[in-house]
Amino acid sequence: MNDFQRESTADVSRTRFQLRSGWDVLAEWADTASQSRKNAVYAALFSMVDRTIFATHHVVGDPARPNELYVAIKDDLVLKTRVNGLDSFDVLHVGGWEQATEQESDRLDP
């Protein structure tokens, strides 16, 4: 491996993800969530930011959208995100699995 390849790999692993959009989704959900559920979601978000999400949570990819991930947090609590590239992600949904999949079908219907 050349020096430039090692450097670029190291730079990517040191770079933190940034939450680009979805603050409104988080705020709306947080209005009615318990403190323990908020803490669990915030911990998952920090894992996204520091790129450890695959080591700390069960993550399921969306087969229809390869850049979108479901992050299982608690019993019926899921965080759905969209990875925008190497530097940012969006929050698409916070809540139950059922609501996340209903939103999916709504987005797919013409």
Image (spheres, rainbow, N blue to C red):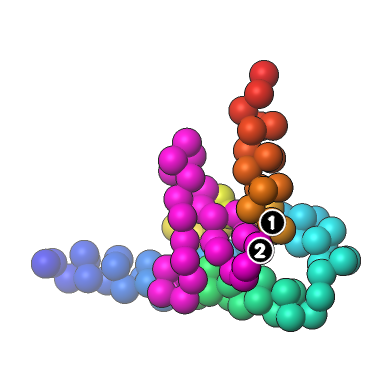
Residue at the image point whose x is 48% and y is 39% from the top: 65
Residue at the image point whose x is 55% and y is 64% from the top: 72
Q: Position of residue 20 (x, y in %)?
A: 65, 57
Residue bearing mark 1: 96
Residue type at tag 1 = Gly
Comparing 43 with 36, the one in front is: 36
Kindly state the secondary structure of the residue where label 1 is placed: loop
Is 94 situated above or below 12? Answer: above
First reached walking from the N terminus: tag 2 or tag 1 = 2
Q: Pointer 2: residues within 10 angstroms few (<14), some, or many (20+)?
A: some
Give the left or right position of residue 70, taking residue 42 as reference: left
Is residue 103 in view? yes
Kindly state the secondary structure of the residue where label 2 is placed: strand
Residue at the far front in the pictured view: 75
- Where residue 28 sits, quadrant-wise, is bottom right
Is 76 situated above or below 41? Answer: above
Residue at the far right in the pictured view: 31
Q: Does the magenta run of residues contain 77?
A: yes
Residue bearing mark 2: 77
Q: Gap in Å between the C-alphas at discs 2 and 1?
A: 5 Å
Q: Position of residue 30 (x, y in %)?
A: 82, 67
Residue at the image point whose x is 38% and y is 72% from the top: 13
Is residue 84 in view? no
Q: Does the magenta run of residues contain 35?
A: no
Give the left or right position of residue 8, taking residue 103 as reference: left
Residue type at tag 2 = Leu
Give the left or right position of residue 10, taking residue 20 as reference: left
Residue at the image point whose x is 68% and y is 40% from the top: 102
Highlighted magenta segment, given as a residue range: 51-80
> The C terminus appears in which quarter of the rendering?
top right
2 and 1 marks in contact (CB < 8 Å): yes
